[in-house]
């Protein structure tokens, strides 16, 4: 606690010290400095924050775009590879070719027989048909443990290529890896000149710019290994991977293998080449796909890559970050220029705005000093419409209105006395108004006793007079404008008993109210006007045994009273018209009681309370009253303002 007090005290001292320092500086300098600091700091913050958010959003969009570019290229290459894999599997599904392979595999020593040559022709013709019409298939071969088969035309001319050294071939991955994959396709990077595949036996250089697909083939019945099917495919088969991105020349897209670049899509001389980093491919191989920034030969590059499934080949895109963010840097420079222009404009505006405040204040101070020295003829020059001008006008009027203020005080005192006399007269009038109800009640009592004397006891007339007297006596209660709900229900009962004197079929009254709700306070004369409204408008001549039901219940801090009759009800148009009249508190020739009760509830408790009506023709009408829960009596005049205090005293 002591530490907290010390901190608060230190804060107060610092606050006073800062104010003292600022008060020693002129208003002109204070306002000018404040405007400059606020405007310039806000401008700087907004400029750099906007630039940061813009750059960040651009960076995210660039990363997303390049990643999608690489992903789409990889998917297209994968689709192309799948086409060639499906072509290779058709060879596997050819039962005639598989039977020929099985028969030749069984006649290992009799390679000169006619059956062997016929089977060989069948196999090599199938290999030729696989590449026929497919311009990117350079060579198709089938290598068994004993022999190799080539692409041979029906006329006997050999196409494609040849494996010059079969014994060495059996030791390479081209032969062993497909067997390990047990029939699944395997792709090999053979873009560089290979010492395995040759165009013919006389060629010095092997096939290049190709990728090789290898699939191990097995006998369907017993899964006996028959050999490896090999397809040498020109890399140009994948040139369509960048279709749709021809106009994008800010970067270069590559097909990357373990030995380097296999293919260069839509090459751009102005865009950077793939970085020469021996560890980069291993990192790509470990991640599978990704996007990263790196420095290569002094250039900041953005590299995005994705591995093609079931291969060790990647699609990679490289772009110079300086080129990507060239537009961003232009925006940055433009923002700085705009910021400088804003600072200059703010300086000029701040000077003139501050001067427009400080100079009139200085003039007003000068006039006040001269007036204080006795020069009452001096006045503040009116030259504007701002608050300082208004202050000057008031100062100019001060001397002229001194006598008027004295006169106003005098007249105000006279007016106060007149109001006091008016409230006194109102109290006397209210007391006189109470005499007439008492006189009428006493007169009714005399009439009742006279009727009992004439009838030698009670009669319907005396009972009716008694009930009417009770009803009138309830209306003369003083001491507050609220009564308990129980008293209100008794008032309603008495009213209905008076009404039932003129009906052959009595109107029944059902009451469902718990003792707790009976003790809550409600406005006087609330239920009786609603009962009267039902008798007059809902029941008519009461010829079919009408009934009124009163229910009351609490919901949290609200009291709901529902008065339901089984009268004739109202149409939708009549109900809407009545609801609109009550909502607007408008004058109504009919249903005056309902409108009056609703107005009194809203004036006393607020707009959140009042009356709501539901009705159907032939089913009756239900009045729903919502009130706040009150456990003690209140005077309804209290909520009408202090000027009613004089009348409140009469209610007490």
Image (tube, rainbow, N blue to C red):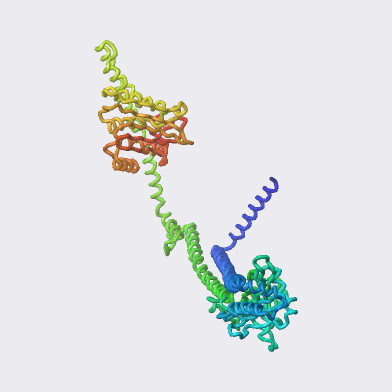
Check the image and report above or below for 311 versus 526: below
Residue 238, image x, y percentages: 59, 77
Q: Nearer the viewer, residue 403 or 455?
A: 455
Check the image and report above or below for 11 versus 25: above
Check the image and report above or below for 619 versus 12: above
Instruction: Tell me which corner region of the image, top left, top right, bottom left or bottom right, holds residue 174.
Output: bottom right
Instruction: Tell me which corner region of the image, top left, top right, bottom left or bottom right, holds residue 127.
Output: bottom right
Instruction: Tell me which corner region of the image, top left, top right, bottom left or bottom right, holds residue 563.
Output: top left
In the rendered image, the quadrant that contains the N terminus is: top right
Q: Nearer the viewer, residue 99 or 75?
A: 99
Residue 55 at least partly seen: no
In the image as oriented, which residue stretches furthest toward the front? 114
**Residue 511 placement, left or right of 21:** left
In the rendered image, the quadrant that contains the C terminus is: top left
Residue 440 at least partly seen: yes
Residue 483, image x, y percentages: 41, 28
**Residue 410 placement, left or right of 239:** left
> Residue at image x 59%, y 85%?
155
Residue 8, image x, y percentages: 65, 50
């Amino acid at each position: 606690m002591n530490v907290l007090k010390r901190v608060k005290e230190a804060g107060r001292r610092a606050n006073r010290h800062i104010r003292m320092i600022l008060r020693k500086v002129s208003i002109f300098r204070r306002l000018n400095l404040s405007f400059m600091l606020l405007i310039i700091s806000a401008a700087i913050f907004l400029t750099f924050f906007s630039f940061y958010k813009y750059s960040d959003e651009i960076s995210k969009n660039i990363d997303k775009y390049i990643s999608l570019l690489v992903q789409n290229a990889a998917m297209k290459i994968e689709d192309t590879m799948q086409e060639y894999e499906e072509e290779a599997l058709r060879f596997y599904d050819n039962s005639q070719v598989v039977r020929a392979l099985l028969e030749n595999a069984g006649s290992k020593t009799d390679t000169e027989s006619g059956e062997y040559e016929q089977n060989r022709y069948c196999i090599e013709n199938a290999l030729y048909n696989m590449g026929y019409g497919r311009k990117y298939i350079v060579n198709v071969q089938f290598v068994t443990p004993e022999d190799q088969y080539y692409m041979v035309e029906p006329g006997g001319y050999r196409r494609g290529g040849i494996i010059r050294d079969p014994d060495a071939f059996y030791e390479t991955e081209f032969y062993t890896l497909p067997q390990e994959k047990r029939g699944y396709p395997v792709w090999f990077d053979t873009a560089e000149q290979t010492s395995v595949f040759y165009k013919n036996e006389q060629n010095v250089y092997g096939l290049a710019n190709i990728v090789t697909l290898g699939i191990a083939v097995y006998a369907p019945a017993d899964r006996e290994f028959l050999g490896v099917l090999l397809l040498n495919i020109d890399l140009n088969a994948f040139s369509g991977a960048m279709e749709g991105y021809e106009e994008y020349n800010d970067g270069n897209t590559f097909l990357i293998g373990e030995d380097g670049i296999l293919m260069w899509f839509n090459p751009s001389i102005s865009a950077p080449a793939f970085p020469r980093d021996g560890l980069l491919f291993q990192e790509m191989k470990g991640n599978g796909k990704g996007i990263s920034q790196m420095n290569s030969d002094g250039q900041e590059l953005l590299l995005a890559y994705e591995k093609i499934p079931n291969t060790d080949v990647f699609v990679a895109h490289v772009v110079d970050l300086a080129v990507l963010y060239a537009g961003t840097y232009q925006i940055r420079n433009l923002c700085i220029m705009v910021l400088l222009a804003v600072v200059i404009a703010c300086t000029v505006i701040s000077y003139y705005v501050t001067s427009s405040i400080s100079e009139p204040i200085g003039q007003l101070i000068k006039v006040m000093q001269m007036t204080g020295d006795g020069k009452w003829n001096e006045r503040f020059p009116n030259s504007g419409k701002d608050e300082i001008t208004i202050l000057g006008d008031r100062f100019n009027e001060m001397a002229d209105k001194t006598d008027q203020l004295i006169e106003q005080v005098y007249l105000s005192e006279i007016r106060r006395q007149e109001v006091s006399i008016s409230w006194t007269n109102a109290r006397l009038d209210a007391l006189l108004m109470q005499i007439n109800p008492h006189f009428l009640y006493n007169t009714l009592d005399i009439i009742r006793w006279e009727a009992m004397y004439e009838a030698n006891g009670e009669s319907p007339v005396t009972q009716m007079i008694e009930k009417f007297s009770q009803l009138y006596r309830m209306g003369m209660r003083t001491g507050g404008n609220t009564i308990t709900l129980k008293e209100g229900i008794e008032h309603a009962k008495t009213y209905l008993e008076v009404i039932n004197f003129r009906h052959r079929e009595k109107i029944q009254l059902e009451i469902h109210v718990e003792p707790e709700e009976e003790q809550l306070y409600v406005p006087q004369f609330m239920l009786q006007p609603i009962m009267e409204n039902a008798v007059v408008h809902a029941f008519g001549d009461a010829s079919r045994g009408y009934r009124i039901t009163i229910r009351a219940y609490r919901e949290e801090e609200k009291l709901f009273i529902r008065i339901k009759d089984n009268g004739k009800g109202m149409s939708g148009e009549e109900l809407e018209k009545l609801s609109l009249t009550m909502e607007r508190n408008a004058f109504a020739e009919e249903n005056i009681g309902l409108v009056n009760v609703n107005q009194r509830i809203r004036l006393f408790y607020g707009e959140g309370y009042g009356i709501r009506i539901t009705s159907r023709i032939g089913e009756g009408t239900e009045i729903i009253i919502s009130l706040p829960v009150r456990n003690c009596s209140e005077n309804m005049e209290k909520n009408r303002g202090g000027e009613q205090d004089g009348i409140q005293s009469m209610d007490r």
